[in-house]
Amino acid sequence: FHSAASAMLRKSALIAVAAAVAEAYILPGTPLTTSCKNVAHSAISTSQQRPRVPSLRRSVSLRMATSVSKEEMTEQLKGAKKMIEDLIDKTNANPIMVRLAWHDSGTFDASINADWPKAGGAIGSIRFEPEIKHGANAGLAGAVKMLEPVKKQFPAVSYADLFQMASACAIELAGGPKIDMKYGRVDAAGPQDCSPEGNLPDAEAGPNGKYGGTSGTKPTEDTTPNGHLRKVFYRMGLNDEEIVALSGAHTLGRAFKDRSGLGAEKTKFTDGSQVARADGKAGIGRTGGSSWTEKWLKFDNSYFTTIPNKSADPELLKLSTDKTLFDDEGFRPFAEKFRDSQDEFFKSYANAHKKLSELGSKFEPCHSAKLLRIHEQNLR
């Protein structure tokens, strides 16, 4: 009797611990639901058969922050989208929201055949240290902080979804194409899910004359910008057309010395004296830096018309990884096509952006056997 009672007490204690872990990681600030408690109970039962703590953590803490119906989830996504749109319109944060999402998803390594989320990608891990402190992510902690009120207001929406949603909204609000986004991503649970530094692309060569390095999941080091770009993006499973199309997003934004180490303190296009927005409204957010285009808060194909134009204003950026798009034989046909047709650029860009936004993502709710896949058209 005493032995059975002790076993029951140990089991109850383990269930309580698992529930606490689930409550801490799944949905901070929200009471743990019965469904998620059942997940914790199930995890304990499994752990008694195969006592492996890491399996318990994967069973509980890596689940998406939701125990709501698909209808309620759709309403939360709609609310989050509206709040993000208002935020971007007020702050002119289009470029940094695109950068945040890309740097979250851009860690993906298609060659890693291991349990999720070992391959990286759009999993929300960029909000954790050490990833947020990687050199390429300088300044992005501020973007994460800007989205925290949205997360607080709509807690069922994962960080991974919020980052990718903000990027798509930023493109559309700047006059770019509508992107057929999909939502329902599972969040990374903690720092243990961060990718190593070195998976993101360099814009210029380092002091050693080389682009990239060997510290990421796969070496990206190369003596040429085109070779480096291919090593980075091929690792993700992207092709030449997608590399060129995604590069075209540099029609938005600026380079700052305190972030990338590139660009001027300010130019005539970034000192606040000119209108940069697509809708013609005043406001640019923080002044300074160097832009690739004159209207750097407007999403169009001006990046592709500016880079090859030898008479373009010298204050506009033309980095090595920009110029190679028109020099490399594999990249050039796409760069010229996008220069000549904004419609073709928008079509290719929307497809590439969608693909990038889903790299490494796991679409699964906390307690349902059915995948929760909510598409962009359901939020309009």
Image: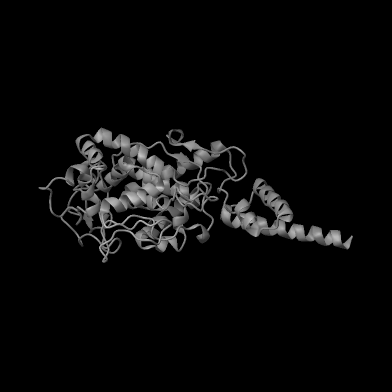
Q: Nearer the viewer, residue 341 or 322?
A: 322
Measured as percent of width and height from the top left, residue 128 is found at 47, 60
The answer to whether any part of residue 182 appears in the image is yes
Quarter placement of the N terminus: bottom right
Q: Nearer the viewer, residue 286 or 108?
A: 108
- Is 255 positioned to the left or the right of 121 in the image? left
The answer to whether any part of residue 97 appears in the image is no
| On screen, residue 70 above or below 147 | above
- Is 128 positioned to the left or the right of 302 in the image? right
Measured as percent of width and height from the top left, residue 162 is found at 44, 48
For the point 50% across and 61% down, the residue is 191
- Is 137 positioned to the left or the right of 115 in the image? left
Colouring style: one colour
Residue at the bottom extreme?
207
Q: How many marks?
A: 0
For the point 19% across and 35% down, the residue is 340
For the point 59% across and 54% down, the residue is 61
Q: Nearer the viewer, residue 372 or 244?
A: 244
Q: Nearer the viewer, residue 58 or 155?
A: 58
Measured as percent of width and height from the top left, residue 291 is found at 22, 53
For the point 50% across and 46% down, the residue is 157
| On screen, residue 376 above or below 128 | above
Measured as percent of width and height from the top left, residue 72 is found at 55, 39
Quarter placement of the C terminus: top left
